Image: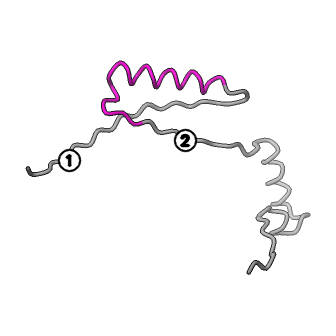
Amino acid sequence: MRLGIPTDSGIERLVVAGDPVVRATQDFERLFPDVEHALLMLEAPDPLNLESLQATLALEQQLAKIPNGRLIACWLFIRTWVHRPV
């Protein structure tokens, strides 16, 4: 059964609107608005082979075309070797 209690975590609902901290927070949010983030992780059997690198670069170039988007690319290659007895 849903009670219909609203959820609003906005700072103006948590403290008095005239509070200097609230005003400073609102000023900060006007200067640095919240943005959407996405984290993409790619997996390949051999991430350093030419085909994998070309596919990653092609994806990066397509993502860079998103209007008003900002792409930060970090290519990190991690390999895990697991020793399993035969």
Cα separation between marks 1 and 2 = 27 Å
Q: Residue at x 83, y 48 (%)?
A: 27
Residue 49 belongs to magenta span: yes
Residue at 75% in and 42% down: 32
The span picked out in magenta is 43-65
Q: Dominant secondary structure of the magenta stretch? A: helix
* Quarter residue 35 falls in: top right
Amino acid at pointer 1: Val
- Front residue of this view, candidates 23 and 38: 38
Q: Is residue 60 left or right of residue 44?
A: right
Secondary element under disc 1, as helix, strand or loop, is loop
Q: Which residue is mark 1?
A: 82
Q: Nearer the viewer, residue 56 or 28?
A: 56
**Furthest residue in direction left, as rendered:** 86
Q: Is residue 59 magenta?
A: yes
- Residue sitting at 20 percent across and 47 percent down? 82
> First in sequence: mark 1 or mark 2?
2
Q: Is residue 51 above or below residue 41?
A: above
Q: Quadrant of residue 36?
A: top right
Instruction: Give coordinates of residue 73: x percent, y percent.
Output: 52, 30
Residue 46 has which mark?
A: none
Q: Is residue 39 left or right of residue 55?
A: right
Q: Which mark is residue 39?
A: 2
Which residue is depicted at the point 89% across and 64% down? Answer: 17
Give the residue type that dot 2 points to.
Answer: Leu
Choose top left, top right, bottom left or bottom right for residue 52: top left
Say few, some or many: other residues with alpha carbon within 10 Å of mark 2 (under 14 / 14 to 19 / 20 or more): few
- Which SS class for mark 2? loop
Residue 30, placed above or below residue 23 = above
Q: Outermost residue, right direction?
A: 18
- x, y percentage for residue 59? 53, 25
x and y percent of residue 40 in the render? 52, 39
